[in-house]
Amino acid sequence: MNGRRESGAYLLGNHRPDGSREISEFVFYDDIDPAALATGIVTIRQTALPRLWQVCRSRGLGVVADVHVHPHGYSQSDSDQANPVIPRVGHLALILPNSRAGGHCRARSAYTNS
Ligand SMILES: [Zn+2]
């Protein structure tokens, strides 16, 4: 899509007792939902989430965050707000902007509030 396709991954690991999170592995969105990137914008079907829980169980890990790239800015898009990849309060979503070839990268995080 001319460098304008989004992509991303779930970051798996553990929540520590002190509240910090340790990331030890990742799994791409489209390994969980083969259609996740079909439109060029990340869209995870809720019916695909049991596959994610299965991966977590098999690895003994939880979802501690997710990360996806944006071709332009780092703000949450309308699609991000309408279709969170984990519809759970407190989930940490990282956005890497300017993912087009030659773009620089600056991370921003957003917590799911609803
Ligand atoms: Zn987004």
Image (spheres, helix red, strand yellow):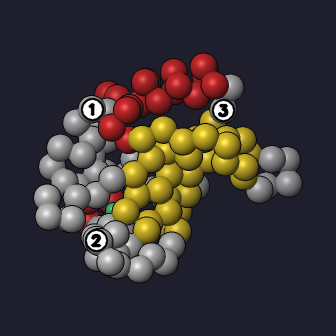
User: Dot 1 corresponds to which residue?
Assistant: 34
Task: Tell me the residue at 47%/56% (across/down).
Answer: 67
Q: Are marks 1 and 2 in contact (CB under 8 Å)?
A: no
Q: Which element is circle 1 on?
A: loop
Dividing the picture into quadrants, the one containing residue 25 is: top right
Residue 100 image label: 2
Q: How many marks?
A: 3
Foreground mark, 1 or 2? 2
Residue 21 image label: none
Q: Which element is circle 3 on?
A: loop
Query: Mark 3 or mark 1, which has the lower sequence index?
Result: 1
Residue type at tag 2: Arg
- Please provide percent x and percent y for residue 107: 51, 73
Within 8 Å: ligand 1 and the Cβ of disc 3?
no
Query: Does residue 99 appear in the picture of this structure?
Result: yes
- Please provide percent x and percent y for residue 79: 26, 59
- Please provide percent x and percent y for residue 12: 60, 41
Q: Which element is circle 2 on?
A: loop
Task: Tell me the residue at 62%/47% (across/down).
Answer: 64
Marks 1 and 2, how far apart in space?
23 Å
User: Dot 3 corresponds to which residue?
Assistant: 61
Quadrant location of the N terminus in the rendered image = bottom left
Q: Nearer the viewer, residue 62 or 26?
A: 26
Residue type at tag 3: Leu
Look at the picture and state if 43 lies above or below 30: below
Q: Are marks 3 and 1 in contact (CB under 8 Å)?
A: no
Residue type at tag 1: Pro
Quadrant location of the C terminus in the rendered image = bottom left
